[in-house]
Amino acid sequence: MLTIEHLNCGYGKHEILHDISVTIPDKKITAIVGQSGCGKTTFLKTLNRMVEEEQGYTTGKISLGNTDIKSISKETLRSRIGMVFQQPIAFPHSIEKNLTYVLKYYGIRDKKVLSEKVEESLKKAKLYKEVKDQLKKSALKLSGGQKQRLAIARSLCVNPEILLLDEPCSALDMKNTIAIEETLMELKGQYTFVIVTHNLGQAKRIADQIIFMDQGKILEVTDKETFFDSPATELAREQIQYM
Ligand SMILES: Nc1ncnc2c1ncn2[C@@H]1O[C@H](COP(=O)(O)OP(=O)(O)OP(=O)(O)O)[C@@H](O)[C@H]1O
Ligand SMILES: [Mg+2]
């Protein structure tokens, strides 16, 4: 479980997130929704300490289980909390190597284990069937949707507890979006997902918990049924009307 307590975050003198307190439950899908610029990506980046890399500051406390994430090394934290970005990232290597280099970084050398993990993660991300005969081919030849599923496989191969996804489907067509939604739905018993999405329909389809943000604050945290049936704020009501 991730527990966020009185989190403030900003860059220089510009505070972007104001007094965020929320719990991310285990093995569920939490969707973060809210207007452009309200701080969704920034919030996601606080959860794996990426904000620090961009010279941002945070105050308050984020705990993974009972441990403050500041006391976990970034390497360990990133293996426990993976992240998938809006623009699919494939490295200029073979499809297989896109996964094995991460596994090797975390100390896995045994060839059999490596190939088992590659197959298993590609299957989880619903990419295996399409690429099983071309694992040695360049990942750059994949389509955008396939690259995004490869990025998901790459995050899953080190068996994280939590996967953060920042608008993973916004550049994808319906078929790829459905594949990713199915992946998350099928895997939520095994992993905790936090997904930022502009697509309220997607949040309605897949989320268990909704975090509704505006101007760097959380306006509402609730189960999806409550959010869509009786939202707490006028702003949420307006946005739901335009779904
Ligand atoms: N590295 C940075 N340095 C300075 N300001 C930043 C940085 N990253 C984000 N911001 C500012 O933080 C605010 C929130 O940005 P953020 O990207 O978190 O919003 P968002 O909700 O993800 O928006 P969108 O829906 O458009 O992706 C914006 O005002 C943005 O300009
Ligand atoms: Mg964003």
Image (spheres, rainbow, N blue to C red):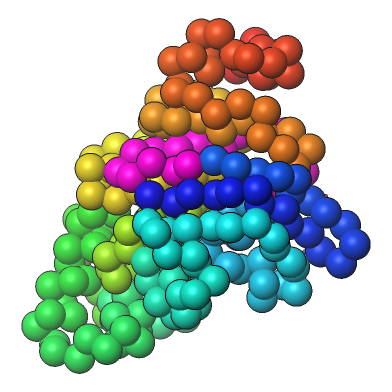
Percent of width and height locating residue 184: 33, 43
Q: Is residue 50 left or right of residue 8?
A: left
Give the quadrant of residue 78.
bottom left
- The total of numbered circles placed on residues is 0
Q: Residue at x 50, y 67 (%)?
A: 69
Residue drawn where x is 78% and y is 59% of the image: 10
Q: Quadrant of residue 13?
A: bottom right
Residue 148 position by quadrant: bottom left
Note whether residue 2 is visible. yes
Percent position of residue 168, x then y: 51, 49
Residue range corresponding to the magenta coloring? 23-41
Residue closer to the observer: 116 or 31: 31
Whether residue 116 appears in magenta in the rendering, the answer is no
Q: What is the quadrant of the C terminus in the image?
A: top right
For residue 230, side relative to residue 188 (left or right): right
Camera-side residue of 14 and 20: 20
Q: State the residue in front, 171 or 215.
A: 215
Against 220, residue 97 (above or below) is below
Q: Extreme left residue here?
A: 112
Query: Residue 195's spot in the image, x, y percent?
Result: 49, 44
Residue 34 lies within the magenta run: yes
In this rendering, position of residue 181 left or right of residue 135: right
Q: Is residue 143 visible to us here?
A: no
- At 75% from the left edge and 45% from the top edge, which residue is drawn? 18
Q: Horizontal and vertical percent for residue 107?
A: 27, 89
Q: Residue at x 65, y 57 (%)?
A: 60
Q: In the figure, is residue 54 to the left or right of 193?
A: right
Which residue occupies the extreme right position in the image? Answer: 13
